[in-house]
């Protein structure tokens, strides 16, 4: 049996050291396991750490918008019953009904299909569904546009959106089907949130 001194272990290549560690663990040679792991830890500590890539201005904007939209969602959830349970109960009999989570699993605005498909730079939104009706509030930034060109959109059924226009008439949806037939565009989130509030009142009443 080889006498695995510290010097002999230190002379091994990374791959050989990992193989030795695996064999020692398999054979339950605890002392050798500890020494191999100590050598690996020492080598890892000496390796230069990769510097974290700084967030780009666009990513910072997207993250900020996701948080702000989610905050609007939280305010609406305090004002109306937007729970999935209530949505399901009020949508009984609607074939294929699936309740919408107001925000994403990370607590921020959800990632829109147009951004996921690579059509736009930013497409983040929050939404609520009851029956066949869906109301959403989102931020939208086309590709290759300055961040200042972003717009907020409220999309909802025509009956719930005063002065609403066809969604395809107010932005380029790249042929993708939208969640409702009308929408409104806003430069500021506060005005968009007010319109979202009014639309929610119609769907959550």
Image (spheres, rainbow, N blue to C red):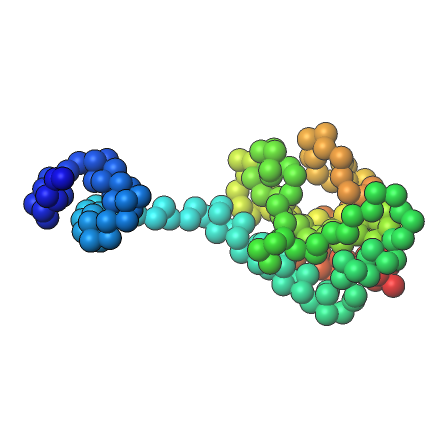
The residue depicted at 81 percent of the width and 43 percent of the height is 180
Instruction: Please provide percent x and percent y for residue 153.
Output: 71, 49
Quarter of the rendering containing residue 69: bottom right
Residue at the outermost right position: 93
Residue 8 visible here: yes
User: Of residues 26 and 47, which is closer to you in this image?
Assistant: 26
Residue 142 visible here: no
User: Of residues 140 and 11, which is closer to you in this image?
Assistant: 11
The vertical placement of 60 against 143, above or below, is below
Residue at the outermost bottom position: 78
User: Of residues 164 and 197, which is closer to you in this image?
Assistant: 197
Quadrant in which the N terminus is drawn:
top left
Instruction: Please provide percent x and percent y for residue 117.
Output: 61, 33
User: Of residues 21 and 144, which is closer to you in this image?
Assistant: 21
Instruction: Please provide percent x and percent y for residue 124.
Output: 62, 48
Instruction: Please provide percent x and percent y for residue 116.
Output: 60, 38
The vertical placement of 158 against 178, above or below, is below
Question: Residue 91 vs residue 154: left or right?
Answer: right
Quadrant in which the C terminus is drawn:
bottom right
Residue at the outermost front position: 1
The residue depicted at 12 percent of the width and 44 percent of the height is 4
The residue depicted at 61 percent of the width and 54 percent of the height is 105
């Amino acid at each position: 049996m080889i006498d695995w001194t510290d010097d002999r272990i230190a002379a091994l290549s990374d791959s050989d050291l990992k193989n030795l560690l695996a064999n020692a663990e398999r054979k339950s040679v605890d002392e050798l396991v500890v020494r191999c792991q100590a050598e690996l830890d020492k080598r890892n500590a000496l390796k230069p750490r990769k510097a974290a890539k700084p967030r780009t201005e666009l990513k910072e904007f997207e993250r900020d918008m996701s948080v702000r939209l989610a905050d609007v969602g939280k305010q609406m959830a305090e004002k109306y019953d937007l729970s999935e349970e209530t949505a399901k109960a009020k949508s009984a009999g609607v074939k294929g009904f699936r309740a919408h989570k107001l925000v994403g699993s990370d607590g921020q605005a959800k990632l829109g299909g147009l951004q996921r498909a690579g059509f736009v730079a930013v497409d983040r939104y929050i939404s609520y569904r009851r029956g066949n009706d869906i109301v959403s509030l989102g931020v939208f930034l086309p590709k290759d546009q300055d961040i200042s060109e972003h717009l907020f959109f409220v999309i909802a059924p025509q009956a719930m959106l005063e002065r609403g226009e066809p969604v395809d008439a107010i932005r380029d949806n790249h042929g993708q089907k939208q969640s409702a037939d009308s929408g409104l565009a806003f430069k500021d989130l506060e005005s968009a949130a007010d319109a979202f509030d009014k639309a929610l009142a119609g769907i959550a009443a």
